[in-house]
Amino acid sequence: MEVTEQKVVSLRYIMKNREGEEIENTFAGTAVQYVHGAGKILPELETQLNGLKKGDKKSITLQQPETFHFEIEIDDIRMATAEEIVSGKPCEITDCRPGCAC
């Protein structure tokens, strides 16, 4: 499965500023999730993630208005539920059972 609109994407990243100073690192914690195409992350970053697959890694540098560099790894991709598409954000899974989307 590829990163495309209406997919919930789980990823980990390291974000650094122009000077190479680490600003944020999610590799030691829980993956970040978002609904691709919902406009909840920077548009240029979302564009750079299009087409990636689970396990893919990518280096991305954004110039808006400050320069940020990301090292990203895709942990998982799944279809968004109707509720997630409407809200534009992933649902919190509290009742995992066979056949659910967690």
Image (cartoon, rainbow, N blue to C red):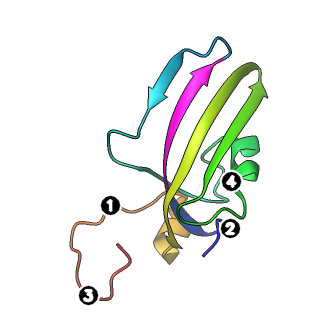
Q: Nearer the viewer, mark 1 or mark 3?
A: 3
- Front in this rendered view, residue 96 or 83: 96
Residue 64 magenta-highlighted: no
Looking at the image, which residue is at 64% across and 70% down?
2
Disc 1 versus disc 4: distance between alpha carbons? 23 Å
How far across and how far down the image is residue 96, in percent?
23, 75
Lower position in the chain sequence, tag 4 or tag 2: 2
Magenta highlight range: 10-17
Disc 1 versus disc 2: distance between alpha carbons? 21 Å
Tag 3: amino acid: Pro
Tag 4: amino acid: Leu
- Secondary structure, mark 4, is helix
Disc 4 versus disc 3: distance between alpha carbons? 29 Å
* Disc number for residue 92: 1
Looking at the image, which residue is at 66% across and 62% down?
52
- The residue identified by callout 3 is 98
Number of residues whose C-alpha sits closer than 10 Å to that of mark 3, classed few (under 14), some (14–19) or many (20 or more): few
Q: Quadrant of the N terminus?
A: bottom right
Lower position in the chain sequence, tag 1 or tag 3: 1
Disc 3 versus disc 2: distance between alpha carbons? 25 Å
Q: Quadrant of residue 99?
A: bottom left
- The residue identified by callout 4 is 49
Looking at the image, which residue is at 66% across and 50% down?
39
Above or below residue 64? Residue 11 is: below
Number of residues whose C-alpha sits closer than 10 Å to that of mark 2, classed few (under 14), some (14–19) or many (20 or more): many
Q: Quadrant of the C terminus?
A: bottom left
